[in-house]
Amino acid sequence: MVRRISSGGPFEAKIGYCRAVVAGGFVHVAGTVGQGETVEAQCRDALATIGRALAEAGAGFCDVVRVRYYLPDREEFARCWPILAETFGAAPPAATMIECGLIAPHYRIEIEVTARAPG
């Protein structure tokens, strides 16, 4: 069984994706950018959106087993570390950081996670 979770964002229908898909025992959350002027603000906002998708799937950050961070400037990543350590706490996932271009130049970080599905 596959369950799709939408956040209702305008780009989901326009581009053809959904915020998360629950399938095969996992919750796959699409790459998520956040709003704000700084990388820290965007990181917090992206994590809030991801948290809502996980909650709708019946999961939480403690269930995340894999995370990927995409940043256009790897030098900004260290500014997010305290936020990420607080979010994942005592259950840190396997992680990868990739330096790359994002969908628009004002975005400073995109975050994608895979979590265990409930059940």
Image (cartoon, rainbow, N blue to C red):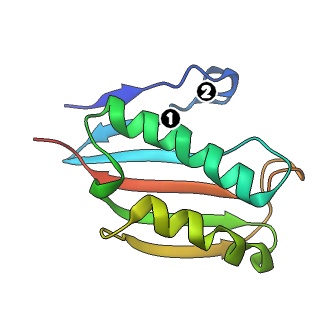
Residue in the picture at 37% in, 55% down: 114
Residue carrying label 1: 19
Which circle's residue, 2 or 1, is located before the other in the chain? 2
Any mark on residue 12, and which?
A: 2
- Secondary structure found at label 1: loop
Q: Is residue 74 above or below residue 91?
A: below
Quadrant placement of the N terminus = top left
- Secondary structure found at label 2: helix
Q: Is residue 17 above or below residue 110?
A: above
Any mark on residue 64, and which?
A: none
Any part of residue 57 in sight? yes
Question: Do the residues bearing badges 2 and 1 touch, measured as CB atoms within 8 Å?
Answer: yes
Cα distance, mark 2 to mark 1? 7 Å
Percent across and percent down for residue 77 are: 70, 74
Residue extending farthest right: 105
Q: Is residue 78 above or below residue 67?
A: below
Query: Is residue 27 toward the left or the right of residue 53 in the image?
Result: left
Percent across and percent down for residue 26 are: 26, 49
Residue type for callout 1: Arg
Residue in the picture at 66% in, 64% down: 70
Query: Is residue 116 toward the left or the right of residue 89 in the image?
Result: left
Crowding near the residue tagged with mark 2, few <14, some 14–19, many ≥20 C-alpha atoms within 10 Å: few
Residue type for callout 2: Glu
Any part of residue 20 in sight? no
Residue in the picture at 73% in, 51% down: 41
Quadrant placement of the C terminus = top left
Q: Nearer the viewer, residue 64 or 90?
A: 90
Residue in the picture at 90% in, 53% down: 105
